[in-house]
Image: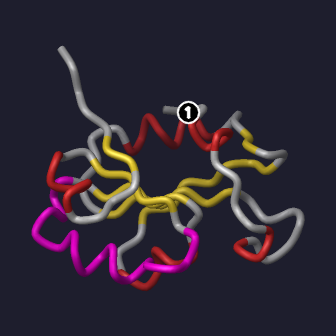
Amino acid sequence: MATFPSFVDWPEAVFSSEQSPLVICVRGDFSFGTFLAQLARNSSAHGRREEIRWVHKDQELRNCQIAFISRSEANRYAKLLQTVEGSGVVTVGETPDFLAASGIIGFTVEN
């Protein structure tokens, strides 16, 4: 999970400056959100430090490069994904319905 941002190329226009961090947002109740924040402390992708943000307003997702959208938001997938449409945000979910709703990456838990 911590390495997948290295496999994505974002247009420079999604960053406000060369020093801007890669912003990873969490929307909803992600059980691994704290773990993700710990991983990001010492991580970088494309020469940018990674920053984790918990967002509470839909529009805040447009300020991210990666948006983790929790299963707790499943009934709002369509609205949240529409909010970031065309913005260059890579959306990540954790349910099969997420991909069906046009999410980009779906994580699954095994064992």
Question: Image point 22% across, 69% down: which residue?
Answer: 77
Residue 40 position by quadrant: top right
The residue shown at (74%, 41%) is: 44
Residue 96, percent from left and from top:
17, 46
Per the image, label 1 sits on a secondary structure element best described as loop
Q: In this view, which residue lies farthest toward the top?
A: 111
Residue 22: % across, % down: 68, 57
Task: Classify mark 1: residues with Cα within 10 Å, few (<14), some (14-19) or many (20+).
Answer: few
Residue 94 painted magenta: no
Pointer 1 residue: 2
Q: Is residue 82 above or below residue 4?
A: below
Q: Which residues are magenta?
A: 71-88
Q: Nearer the viewer, residue 102 or 58?
A: 102
Residue 67 in picture, x, y percent from top left: 45, 60
Instruction: Specify the principal SS of the magenta part.
Output: helix
Q: Position of residue 57 (x, y in %)?
A: 36, 81
Question: Measuring 73% from the left and 43% from the top, which residue is drawn there?
Answer: 45
